Image (cartoon, rainbow, N blue to C red):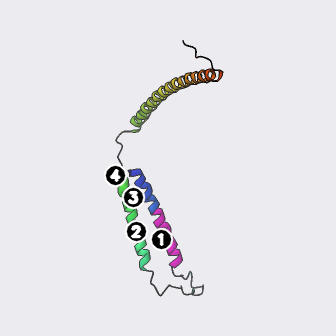
Amino acid sequence: MDIISQLQEQVNLIANLALNTVGTLQRDAPPNRLSPNYPEPPPHPTEDGANFSEEPKLMGASLVKAAKQFDLLVASLPISETGEEAQLKRIAELQAENDAVGQELQKQLEAAEKELNQVQELYRQATDNCLNLKKPDVN
């Protein structure tokens, strides 16, 4: 798999981990008193008396690990040592090459269309000769 695909997958993984982490925190975090003026919040229901204090730490560690892996992938990208001027020159060269290839393809297309027209004409003549039971013209 190329580096760009790996980066895309890593970004998707980070987004998924972040979404799950925030969702889990929203779902499982105990209520907190906002001010002494407010009444005590109701107790937070827990499933089977489970303690969720470790889960956010594990999820946070997974998120940090994924971010570090992303950083490693970014660091492995090739570094362009050329400046903007050299890159623009390379783009112009590639554009010229693209134009030349495009012209060659256009010539080949025109030649193929010409050949197709000739074949179609020969086919038309052959079918006319068969339908009319005429002897083919010999040139």
Q: Is residue 44 left or right of residue 97?
A: right
Pointer 4 with pointer 1, Cβ within 8 A: no
Lower position in the chain sequence, tag 2 or tag 4: 2
Question: Residue 134: x and y, percent?
Answer: 62, 18
Q: Secondary structure at mark 3?
A: helix
Q: Is residue 79 left or right of residue 133?
A: left
Q: Amino acid at mark 3?
A: Phe
- Assess disc 3: are there few (<14), some (14-19) or many (≥20) residues with their C-alpha within 10 Å of its C-alpha: many
Q: Quadrant of residue 113?
A: top right
Circle 1 residue: 21
Q: Secondary structure at mark 1?
A: helix
Disc 2 from disc 3: Cα separation: 12 Å
Question: Residue 82: x and y, percent?
Answer: 36, 39
- Most foreground residue, 111 or 116: 116
Pointer 1 with pointer 3, Cβ within 8 A: no
Q: Amino acid at mark 2?
A: Ser
Lower position in the chain sequence, tag 3 or tag 4: 3
Residue 76 circle label: 4
Residue 70 circle label: 3
Lower position in the chain sequence, tag 2 or tag 3: 2
Question: Residue 53: x and y, percent?
Answer: 43, 80
Q: Secondary structure at mark 2?
A: helix
Which residues lie in the magenta part?
14-28
